[in-house]
Amino acid sequence: RGTMTVGDLAKLLHKDASEVIKKLISLGVMATINQELDMDTILLIASEFGVEVEVKIPVEEDTFETVEEVDDEADLTTRPPVVTIMGHVDHGKTTLLDAIRSTNVTGGEAGGITQHIGAYQVEINQKKITFLDTPGHEAFTLMRARGAQVTDITIIVVAADDGVMPQTVEAVNHAKAAGVPIIVAVNKIDKPDADPDKIKQALTEYELVPEEWGGDTIFVNVSAKQRLGLEELLEMILLVAEVNDYKANPDKRARGTVIEAELDKGKGPVARVLVQHGTLKIGDAFVAGNTFGRVRAMVNDKGRRLKEAGPSTPVEITGLTEVPLAGDPFMVFEDERKARAISDRRSIKQRQSELGANSRVTLDDLFKHI
Ligand code: GTP
Ligand code: MG
């Protein structure tokens, strides 16, 4: 465990141990000279003495970020595509996903506005598709900014009775920046004033030209409400997936991205994660952003308990020590000790960047203890 004693810290700060102890007591921490301090306390005390602590993190040890292992082609197997549904407010993203899942999510949402990113998996003709329902573009932007690439295909929903709106354009730009294929779902075609051709025309301005007009963008007319065109939409998704043949190696330690996380009163920190590589198993020790844990229980989108989850599977996990952030990468490690050490390093890195720059003291020694 990466800690140091009161005596070590005093030496490092060129202070008397008694001064450090006094400071600790003033902060409500009763301590002796041999007492081990946690990272938070070390950083707090250092800043109390007006010293900014700089912790040198040996980069090569943070394999999480630095090592991008290459899989042997022979180890790769086809995985379900991960599909994100985006589009302007009220154009019917949730209703569409809802219709696809044949359950009712919109009805249970406060005010009918999506509260958070949900991840779901559906199966059509024995082929699975993983869907992410986004609350809007902020979350997507945040995840992208944090380097999380989770989606393979973007469905852009445009209401046929409305038109191409600012968030439609944003969604198009996001998808293009991410370099993922776009399928346009022209929704609400049941409405009397629906004009799907007007939507197609408007989108040509953004280089989305329908196939029948000589372009290469797939457009599907749908009515989420009346369940029209859904089969065709799903077929198109599977077609794009087949062409791109998304693959992953299921036979290794899991890696993926946190889709959303929260503190549950009963269960503690809960995270919904998308497994992207490898297979996540009960008991696995993992790092998620600055936090770590061990998978205690794993539940799929239908509330079923799972023992393991392979590539493209969204699961809810418990067993975290803290709540990670949406977009945080997660990765399984060989043991909990290692996972904990890495998450500690990251917390320090972060805390350090939060404390402004004053006088600097280097704490490399700290890591000799880990
Ligand atoms: P946000 O999550 O708030 O961005 O909205 P959304 O894009 O998820 O839209 P939502 O699914 O909540 O639908 C907005 C409204 O449009 C609801 O009142 C739906 O009932 C209605 N709606 C969605 N799809 C259709 C459709 O195909 N036809 C008609 N007539 N109404 C639809
Ligand atoms: Mg919604």
Image (cartoon, rainbow, N blue to C red):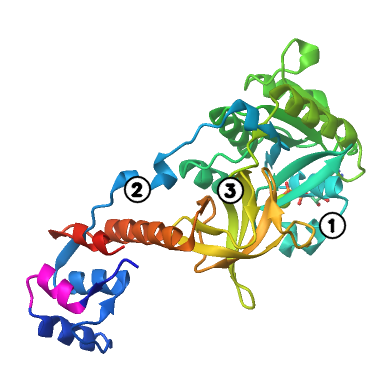
Identify the residue at horizontal 21%, vertical 74% (top origin): 45
**In the rendering, at what x and y percent does residue 285 appear?**
53, 60
In the rendered image, which residue does mark 3 sit on?
254
- SS type, badge 3: loop
Residue 143 locus on image (x, y percent): 52, 46
Q: Residues within 10 Å of mark 2 (few under 14, many from 20)?
A: few
The magenta stretch is 6-15
Q: Secondary structure at mark 2?
A: helix
* 62 w.r.t. 82: above or below: below
Q: Is 336 or 187 nearer to us in this picture?
A: 336
Type of amino acid under label 3: Ala
- Image spot of residue 201 (x, y percent): 73, 20
Which residue is denoted by mark 2 in the rendering? 61
Give how far across and how far down residue 86 sits, in percent: 67, 40
Q: Is residue 302 left or right of residue 229?
A: left
User: Is the CB–ligand 1 distance for label 1 below 8 Å?
Assistant: no
Task: Evaluate whether residue 281 shows in this view.
Answer: yes
2 or 1: mark nearer the eye: 2
Question: What residue type is disc 1 on?
Answer: Asn
